Amino acid sequence: MPQAALLTVHGMGETPRDYAEKLFQAVAARLGPLSGQVDFRSIYYQDILKPNQETVWARVSDTTRLHYADLRRFLLFGFGDAAGLENRKEIDGSVYELAQAAIARQLLGVARQDPSARVVFLAQSLGCQVLSSYIYDAQKALAGGQVLAGVWKDVDAWAMRALGARLSDSDRHFMAGATCSAFVTTGCNIPIFCAAHKQMDIKPIALPTPGFEWINFYDPDDALGWPLQPLSPGYAELVDDRAINAGQGVVTWILKSWNPLSHTVYWSDAQVLDALTQRLRLEVT
């Protein structure tokens, strides 16, 4: 039976459903025989957003001649994801809620295998904001606070509506990330979402477990990836920012400046893979 779980959350833009398979293979190879004690799961929410993005792209590109088609498509699908997640997020069935539901379902899947499994999250780009918001909402709800959007606005009502069943206390506990031992974030753009808030409102999640660590990898050449410690004292205390040369130069310096292609190589970087492997090894030995 697995003793730990690695759950991934993808970033913005067009993403295949099997986006994490190469990463899982690389981590499993590093773990060797210990990989059998890890439950590998990927969280997928791009299917919620993609159909309408494809419609908008087709309407524009079929009727208008535009330059920089690849860049425009990246911006439409990438920043369309971010906009969609924030748009009317308080209504039932919003994109925000559906993305959180994708996280909740995978966590419940792990819990049904082993309710004591230690969870390590890996999130990329926009997925860092999606996951952080989910855990923040969950912690607030379980502490008796009011949550205005998403699954945790009324988690029991969501469970009956989406799962057709009530949640046990153990389910709620696990779904809230209460066994999470580590976050690893790459190309994180949480600062973009914090920039419009007052300093007093920029707060990270609470420490889920003793010994929890949040490792944030960012490449200084990646305009979509940011350090988190400067955001607030809370982030400074919680997060370990690590600047890296993502991919160790596998793309040219031209592509590693602002170009979105520089944003896609973190999960093949040895430093990221080694950090994940080290944390998972701690959980299963």
Image (tube, helix red, strand yellow):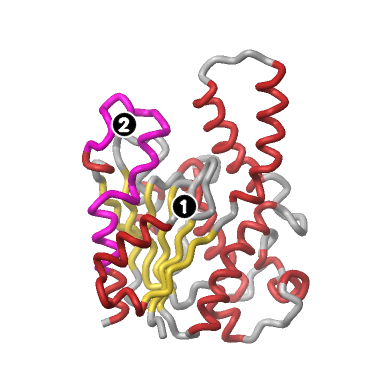
* Badge 2 amino acid: Lys
**Does 62 appear above or below 37?**
above
How far from the left and from the top, in percent, is residue 143? 58, 75
Q: Earlier in the sequence, mark 2 or mark 1?
A: 1
Closer to us: 136 or 171: 171
**Residue 207 in view of the camera:** no
Residue holding disc 2: 256
Secondary-structure class at tag 2: loop
Q: CA distance from mark 2 to mark 1?
A: 21 Å
**Does 119 appear above or below 127?**
below
Residue holding disc 1: 19
**Does 191 appear above or below 1?**
above
Closer to us: 284 or 128: 284
Residue drawn at (55%, 69%), measured in percent from left and top? 106
Q: Where does the C terminus fall, quadrant-wise?
A: bottom left
Closer to us: 261 or 32: 32
* Badge 1 amino acid: Tyr
Residue drawn at (59%, 32%), measured in percent from left and top? 76
